Image (cartoon, rainbow, N blue to C red):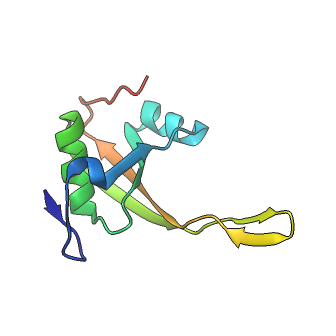
Amino acid sequence: MTATSTGIELAPHQVIYRPVVTEKGMHQSERYNAYTFEVNPTASKEDIKKAVESLWEVRVTGVRTQTRKGKPRRHKTQTGYTKDWKKAIVQLHEEDRIAFF
């Protein structure tokens, strides 16, 4: 269990929501051994590192995070936004790999 900045303890499966599978993300995983995940917005870089290491049993060398803003969306006459979300790009040791497929 890891403690976030809000003081709430999260299990590793609560920190990592899902992998983000895009063309750019697949290129980064093949060329730079960096994987992209959607993560809990309250999780810190250290929480993300510990969660990835425990879930996939790999060695993490670096974590970069971004807070993504929601996009505007319309439904008939209503306008709104999708939710904001946090993205983490996790760099692994050169000998480690994660196989999603």
Residue 44 in percent (x, y) is at 27, 66
Give the vertical position of 10 relative to 5 (above or below): above
The residue furthest bottom is: 6
The residue furthest left is: 1
Give the residue drawn at x 29%, y 55%.
15
Residue 53 in the figure: left or right of residue 69: left
Give the residue drawn at x 18%, y 75%.
7
Residue 34 in percent (x, y) is at 39, 42
The residue furthest top is: 101
Which quarter of the rendered picture does the C terminus lie within?
top left
Which quarter of the rendered picture does the N terminus lie within?
bottom left
Residue 2 in the figure: left or right of residue 79: left
Residue 51 in the figure: left or right of residue 78: left
Residue 67 in percent (x, y) is at 48, 67
- Residue nearer the viewer, 95 or 72: 72
Give the vertical position of 70 relative to 98 (above or below): below
Tell me which corner region of the image, top left, top right, bottom left or bottom right, holds residue 86.
bottom left
Residue 3 in the figure: left or right of residue 69: left
Tell me which corner region of the image, top left, top right, bottom left or bottom right, holds residue 9.
bottom left
Give the residue drawn at x 57%, y 39%.
22
Give the residue drawn at x 41%, y 38%.
32
Give the vertical position of 40 relative to 19 (above or below): below
The residue furthest right is: 77
Residue 59 in percent (x, y) is at 19, 40
- Residue nearer the viewer, 97 or 39: 39
